[in-house]
Image (spheres, grey):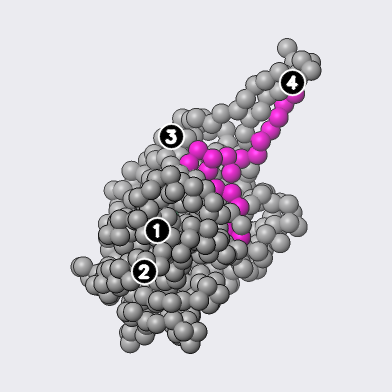
């Protein structure tokens, strides 16, 4: 297993000899000890990226595309091995981990296709005195700070478009899940042959100082972050000092609206996907179930039956559908939200008590009669808890759905397509699943409104996030 920092193509120990222990959340056992980078290591990585970027930006788009396509092939050829690393350090079930590698690799395939299709425009200015040429140039060096919930996909969703556009990158992977990141860096350099210094990987025990140092490095012109809204706010303030370009994929608080005319079996299937995918630790997870009063009991009972039938356990075991939470703090936080809701008058339909260790497990839980302003509805749960609340009119459903500062994702279930589209348009979220519990796709623009973020990842616009637009005024 690769446990060293990757800087300029070299495998290095941290300059201050610090390390980070990585534990399996399913049993608390030590998986590996990884080198931890210092401020000096981070600056060395930025220097290496700055050098590599100059050459890479001049590589023909077709050649860049072919190397990116090879990243896809190599990831898929190593899907099982990479998935095993994810299960060991994150805990998610094997099937989810295999799915994540497929999803993560797809960002390379998609962006290999985009790399050769970047468009600008040529036009005549309104007064007819000049030609206006608009084209896109790489930002330069991009700092990427990535989370633990998708140890591979949240890296590739940024790296693939950044490289496609001609940038070099410095990545600070989550300290909980650095092993997948380091394994990817190895594959990209050794099996794909990406140039040294193009992808630098600096794991750190504590992130604040090394990340700030990188943001102050002359060559770094952009930070791309996926994580919580509070950390995003800090990074946005720091980015202001050097007016860095940013993309921020922050927290969510997705409403899941079920109308009485919905196909309830489909709605429950969607709810399980939207809530429980990747052990309920996704930003897109359904956080509040807003259900028309006349079908509350029918939907609630079906959902509780489906949730309680899910097999919880170590992601390595066959048949396990829900893995552990990432650590004890996560269990305490989820349990605190459930207990708070119960104190506020909610009733537990299933689940509701942490599972004894080893490991950090919380059972699939359904809560009924939850108050709108209860913390379980106002905060991002990041755990397997489905709070249900009732509505009686369409307007009320929309008001409830929008009663949050977050705006990443929303779900609407109804068989009336006209109403489905009308309600979808009024939900203040960057992405909507209309009769669907999963919408993530490398070909789609992923991102949020309001305090859920800035910018989009994936789709055709994803690559332009890693570019500056340049306008040349001329005549001929
Ligand atoms: C996330 O949880 O941030 C990403 C979820 C996804 O890509 O589907």
Front label number (4 vs 1):
1
Front label number (3 vs 1):
1
Whether pointer 4 and pointer 2 mark residues with C-beta atoms closer than 8 Å, the reply is no
User: Is label 1 in a helix, a strand or a loop?
Assistant: loop
Q: For disc 1, does the CB lie below 8 Å from ligand 1?
A: no
Give the distance between the C-alpha atoms of the residues marked 4 and 2, in whole angstroms: 59 Å
The quadrant of the rendering that contains the C terminus is: top right
Q: For disc 2, does the CB lie below 8 Å from ligand 1?
A: no
Horizontal and vertical percent position of residue 30 = 37, 78
Left or right, 381 with reference to 271: right
Q: Is residue 231 above or below residue 196?
A: below
Residue labelled with disc 4:
125
The part of the image, by quadrant, that contains residue 361 is bottom left
Give the distance between the C-alpha atoms of the residues marked 4 and 1, in whole angstroms: 51 Å
Can residue 423 be seen by looking at this rendering?
Answer: yes
Q: Which residues are magenta?
A: 451-473
Front label number (3 vs 2):
2
Left or right, 439 with reference to 373: left
Q: Residues within 10 Å of mark 2 (few under 14, many from 20)?
A: many
Front label number (4 vs 2):
2
Give the distance between the C-alpha atoms of the residues marked 4 and 3, in whole angstroms: 32 Å
Q: Residues within 10 Å of mark 4 (few under 14, many from 20)?
A: few
Q: Who comes first in sequence, dot 4 or dot 1?
A: 4
Residue labelled with disc 1:
259
Front label number (4 vs 3):
4
Give the distance between the C-alpha atoms of the residues marked 3 and 1, in whole angstroms: 40 Å
């Amino acid at each position: 297993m690769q446990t060293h920092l990757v800087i300029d193509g070299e495998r290095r120990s941290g300059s201050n000899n610090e390390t980070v222990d990585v534990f399996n959340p399913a049993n608390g056992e030590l998986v590996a000890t990884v080198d931890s980078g210092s401020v000096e290591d981070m600056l060395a990585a930025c220097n290496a990226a700055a050098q590599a970027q100059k050459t890479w930006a001049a590589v023909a788009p077709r050649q860049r595309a072919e190397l990116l396509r090879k990243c896809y092939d190599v990831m898929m050829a190593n899907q099982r091995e990479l998935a095993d690393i994810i299960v060991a350090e994150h805990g998610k079930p094997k099937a989810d981990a295999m799915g994540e590698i497929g999803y993560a690799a797809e960002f390379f395939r998609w962006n290999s296709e985009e790399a050769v299709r970047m468009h600008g425009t040529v036009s005549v200015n309104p007064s007819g005195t000049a030609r206006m040429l608009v084209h896109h140039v790489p930002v330069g060096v991009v700092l990427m700070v990535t989370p633990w919930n998708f140890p591979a996909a949240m890296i590739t969703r940024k790296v693939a478009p950044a490289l496609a556009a001609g940038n070099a990158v410095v990545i600070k992977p989550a300290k909980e899940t650095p092993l997948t990141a380091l394994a990817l860096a190895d594959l990209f350099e050794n099996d794909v042959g990406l140039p040294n210094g193009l992808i630098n990987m600096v794991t750190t025990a504590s992130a604040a100082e090394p990340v700030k140092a990188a943001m102050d490095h002359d060559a770094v012109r952009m930070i791309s972050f996926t994580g919580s809204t509070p950390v995003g706010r800090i990074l946005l303030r720091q980015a202001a000092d050097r007016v860095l370009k940013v993309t921020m994929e922050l927290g969510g608080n997705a409403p899941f609206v079920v109308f009485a005319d919905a196909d309830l079996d489909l709605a429950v299937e969607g709810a399980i996907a939207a809530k429980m995918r990747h052990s309920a630790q996704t930003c897109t997870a359904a956080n509040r179930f807003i259900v028309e009063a006349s079908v509350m009991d029918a939907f609630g009972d079906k959902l509780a039956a489906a949730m309680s039938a899910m097999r919880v356990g170590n992601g390595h075991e066959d048949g396990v559908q829900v893995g552990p939470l990432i650590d004890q703090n996560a269990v305490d936080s989820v349990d605190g939200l459930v207990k708070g809701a119960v104190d506020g008058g909610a009733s537990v339909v299933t689940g509701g008590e942490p599972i004894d260790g080893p490991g950090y497990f919380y059972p699939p839980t359904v809560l009924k009669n939850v108050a709108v302003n209860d913390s379980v509805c106002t905060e991002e749960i990041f755990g397997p808890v489905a709070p249900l609340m009732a509505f009686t009119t369409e307007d009320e459903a929309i008001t409830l759905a929008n009663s949050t500062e977050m705006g990443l994702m929303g779900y609407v279930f109804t068989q009336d397509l006209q109403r489905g589209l009308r309600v979808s348009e009024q939900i203040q979220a960057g992405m909507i699943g209309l009769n669907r519990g999963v919408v993530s796709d490398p070909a789609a623009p992923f991102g949020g409104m309001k305090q859920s973020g800035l910018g989009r990842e994936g789709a055709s616009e994803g690559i332009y996030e890693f570019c500056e637009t340049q306008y040349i005024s001329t005549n001929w």
